[in-house]
Amino acid sequence: MATLDQTQEMDRSGVSGRLLRLAQELGDTSSRDENAVAGATARVTALAPTGEELAALMSDRNPFVRSGAARWMRHLSQVSQTAIDALRAAVYDQNPYVVQAALGSAGILKIESVRTDARNCLDDSNPCVIHAAIFALGKLGPSEMGELLLPFLDSDEQHVQVAAITAIGQLNYQPAIPLLIRRLEAVCELLTRHRSQLNVATRFLHTLVALEAREAIPLFIRIARDEVGLRGLAVQGLIELRAEEAAPALLPMLSQLLDSQHEEKLCCRLLYLMTVVDYRFAMPTVRAFLGHRQPGIRCAALKAVASWKDRDALDDIRLIASADVSAFVRPAAVTALADIGSTDVLEELDRLGSDANALVRVSVAEALGRLVPLPDQARATLTRLVRDEALAVARAAQEALLTQPVQVPTPPAVGSALPASLREQASAARAYLRRWQSERPSPEVADALQILLSVLD
């Protein structure tokens, strides 16, 4: 039997061995080998180090271990004061990688006591440390911290510039909007000669949208017209800003794209923009895109005309639903047909319910299920589709019927409907029928069960 001293020695040895193993694995998380990093990360996750263990390892002689421990802090659900103190000390480590890891974890964990330390790091000579400090301040706030980041919009290091732009957006620092617009204009002028500035311009666009900068709408419109590589992002920004004035300005560009085969995303975004701001003067142009060569654009046009209930597009939609070459466009056309035509197109929907394309039949079932109250003709079509050989079609039809309000005939009086000799068993019969009802029977059986339950109730 082990003595007390031997037991304590074994405990110390176990703790020491665990820390050594953690140190090895945390050091390997900084490896250049992706497979080694993935393996080490999995092993550290399994070991689940505590904040105290990570704090102890942040004093290790190996900078890779220190940086790994600082970086792993962000995975903790609760951070002790010991761990916070270790992170703050790591911000002043001689190794810049350790400093970066500590600032990053402090920002993600929102440790406000590190705010002053992060501000001090803005004067560091290492641009990577400055980047990490900007990241931390963007996470920590408050919004006024954005003023400290404005000078970095002119940094010679692009990654620092991008970090500052992103952090200003996270801080929602509204006073930066005019400067951001001017910097975006300057970057756009450089794009023709320096495509490397595309990443910076992209970040400016995202941040201005995040700040809801309506002052940037005229610039966004110009970018959408002229800047290849940024046009789609500019249109997306106009969509998010609900920029009504952008629709008439960009309608001529949409018309020019009618015969294009290489601008699918841009076309789809422009079509969506027209509907988001409800620019109905664009209806004829949007309707023309129902015949576009790209199936994705035809789908976008179908959604647009459906959102407007454009009955002038019905003939084109009927043709697409019946004969489009794309098996994925036809279901979208069925949806648009039902949304626009409603009960006027029940015969066509019934015919399409027998189409060879199962996706079309699913769309028919879903479209009919949105009709409330459900017409008898539509109910007959759904009842037929419940028995469809394709499981997805049958399920869609059954769900469409089950979501309809149940129309229960007025039951006769209980005294005349239920024989007196059976009334003692009414509660048992009611429980049995409710259990049957919970098994989602066919629509006909479900209606019959509901009638019987109404009598028993």
Image: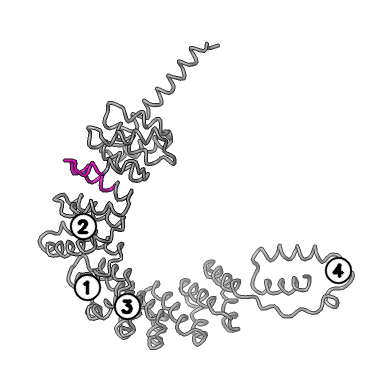
Residue 92 occupies which quadrant of the picture? top left
Mark 1 secondary-structure assignment: helix
Mark 4 secondary-structure assignment: helix
Question: Disc 4 or 3, which lies upstream in sequence?
Answer: 3
Residue 89 occupies which quadrant of the picture? top left
Tell me which amino acid carries mark 2. Answer: Asn
Q: Is residue 10 above or below residue 147?
A: above
In 3D space, how far apart are the residues under numbered discs 1 and 4 (Cα atoms)?
77 Å
Instruction: Identify the disc placed on residue 227.
Output: none
Which quarter shows the N terminus?
top right
Left or right, 366 with respect to 260, comes to: right
Q: Residue at position x 43%, y 35% from top?
A: 48
Which residue is label 2 attached to?
A: 199
Segment colored magenta: 119-135
Q: Return the residue found at the far left.
A: 193
In 3D space, how far apart are the residues under numbered discs 3 and 1 (Cα atoms)?
17 Å
Please rate how many residues cluster around mark 1, counting C-alpha atoms within 10 Å: few if below 14, some from 14 to 19, many from 20.
Answer: some
Q: Residue at position x 66%, y 78% from top?
A: 407
Which residue is label 1 attached to?
A: 218
Instruction: Identify the disc placed on residue 274.
Output: 3
Tell me which amino acid carries mark 4. Answer: Arg
Question: Disc 2 or 4, which lies upstream in sequence?
Answer: 2
Tell me which amino acid carries mark 3. Answer: Met
